Image (cartoon, helix red, strand yellow):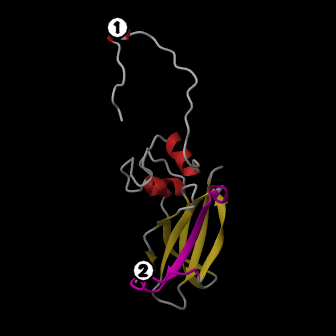
Amino acid sequence: NGDILYEDTSLKNDVYIIDNILLEVSGAITMLDQWMVSNKVANALADSDGDGVDNRTEYGFGGDPNSDDASSILPRSGMVSNLGTTWLEYIYRRRSDHQVRGLNYTVEATTNLISGSWNTNGVVDIGFGSIDSEIDSVTNRVSTETLSEQFIRLRVTGSTTDTDTETSIETNPAAIPA
């Protein structure tokens, strides 16, 4: 509780050697916890570098929580044409070892933002390539041929504690331009 139990003022400014200390950590330390310690950040939901991206999202996309890197790590989208079909293309960063980390990346689509009904129907996984040894770039598309109004988003889910508490990062939806 922080109370001083014993103080001998005659011993001040002496050197003491403390030995045989046992530090017991309750519960498992997750890979997110390890990443936070190595990056010297204390709160997963805080935005340590002020770039508009919280530390948990920086972790999921391989960002640096101590550097303004939002423009380079957040997903991007745009219209592309391939073999006569127009697509809404969505590209995001994924940790190469996402399965080991317990992270799942799911691209979802909807035609109605009000309903809250998102699914993977019509989302085509084009593939991925390595950005570096830790991060992949993943490309997904949704055809714009049959539905004129569609939205696409990315959900990153995974266990963040030893009790498998599910956490979710949801990106802002990308839309087919009018």
Q: Amino acid at mark 1?
A: Ser
Q: Is residue 127 above or below residue 39?
A: below
Quarter of the image holding residue 102? bottom right
Q: Nearer the viewer, residue 84 or 27?
A: 27
Q: Position of residue 118 (x, y in %)?
A: 50, 81
Q: Which mark is residue 10?
A: 1
Q: Quadrant of the N terminus?
A: top left
Furthest toward the front, the residue is: 5
Residue beneath the point at 54% across and 77% down: 108
| Left or right: where 177 falls relative to 61 | left
**Residue designated by label 2:** 177
Q: Is residue 177 above or below residue 146?
A: above
Q: Amino acid at mark 2?
A: Pro
Quarter of the image holding residue 136? bottom right
| Left or right: where 3 falls relative to 129 | left
Residue 96 appears in the figure = no
Q: Position of residue 154 (x, y in %)?
A: 52, 70
Q: Position of residue 40 (x, y in %)?
A: 46, 40
Mark closer to the observer (2, 1): 1
- Answer few, some or many: residues within 10 Å of disc 2's Cα (few below 14, many 20 plus, some between 14 and 19): few
Residue beneath the point at 56% across and 49% down: 27
101 within the magenta span: yes
Q: Nearer the viewer, residue 28 or 176?
A: 28
151 within the magenta span: no
Residue beneath the point at 36% across and 50% down: 50
Q: Position of residue 58 (x, y in %)?
A: 48, 54
Q: Which residues are magenta?
A: 98-120
